[in-house]
Amino acid sequence: MANKALSVVTTRRLPAPVEARMGDLFDVHLRQDDDGPMQREALLSVLPGAEVLVPTLSEQIDAGMLDVAGDSLRLIANYGAGVDHIDVAAARERGILVTNTPGVVTEDTADMTMALILAVTRRMTEGLAMMQAGEWNGWSPMTLLGGRVGGRALGILGMGRIGQAVARRARAFGMSIHYHNRSRLRPEIEEALGARYWESLDQMVAHLDVLSINCPHTPSTYHLMNARRLKLMKPTAVIVNTSRGEVVDENALTRGLRAGELAGAGLDVYEGGADINPRLRELRNVVLLPHMGSATVEGRIEMGEKVIVNIRTFQDGHRPPDLVIPAMT
């Protein structure tokens, strides 16, 4: 295998240095058209004969698609950390390995989380809209009053790499750190982060001023922040989600925001992907971003480099460093 150029199919345009490197190393089929999500029919047409598929979260890789790919497909090297769009179990049943790119987006996503916390609490988008509409008439003591983040209680739901990176940033802003996780951190990590562990998510959310969602989407986290839990939060609290939209019941969140049961929200991910609740778009106390938490040039290139390392390691007959197993999803 090492002497043969692997046949690789990518589903989206990737940074130029990544595409150039793939072209040097593999027999790669790159996207040449616009950069929209690759439609299922188009992907099915290029899959037969491919040995490696490099998808993104925009493509659903299910058992039916794997059947069309046939016996030639041996590796799905996902460009991104999340793999809930891939039927990992079905892939493994067919002897297809799945890899991802963990750890690359940690700092970028944590930066965006803090940006959303500041944008919501300081009403930045409302100020921007006022300026763009030409409605600002000068400084006023009572215009667009927000709140300080210093001294506020931040709760982090999911204290993995990104959650801990958020905690480090928030602590520098003077926020108190609280967290709920499926397992408690080691005491020395808690001490370094100044973080308090809550075994009960219900009790934690009732205590918070800001809740940051940083856990993956799994069957156990689907709608973890449901209508009941959202109602436990203070009416002055805000919720920020840069992880997965499915963790929050978006309809319940919208109702709570419209009813004044929550002060605001900052969202970079959505339960329906690009299909966003139109009522959510209308709210002035909500900051909506187009899933750009990891959108830095450096991060995207590092993701591509990880994909290439996984493919080359597989090509050399070794276990890829970022192998995903069904138990991890």
Image: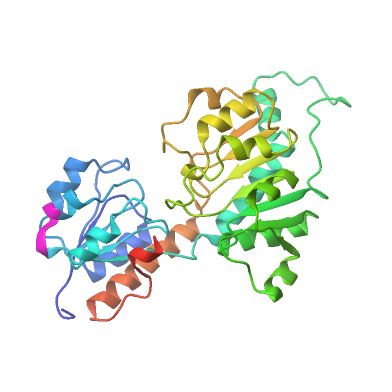
The answer to whether residue 71 is above or below residue 249 is: below
Q: How is the image coloured?
A: rainbow
- x and y percentages locating residue 321 in the rendered image: 37, 75
* Residue sitting nearer the eye, 250 or 298: 250
Q: Which residues are magenta?
A: 67-71
In the displayed structure, does residue 257 sit left or right of residue 78? right
Residue drawn 69% across and 39% down? 233
- x and y percentages locating residue 156 in the rendered image: 64, 54
Q: Is residue 28 visible?
A: yes
Residue drawn 27% across and 60% down? 89
The answer to whether residue 276 is above or below residue 39 is: above
* Residue sitting nearer the eye, 229 or 209: 229
> Furthest residue to the right?
141
- Label count reads 0
Asked if residue 69 is among those painted magenta in the image, a careful observer would answer yes
Q: Looking at the rendering, in which quadrant would you find the C terminus?
A: bottom left
The answer to whether residue 222 is above or below residue 127 is: below
Residue drawn 12% across and 52% down? 68
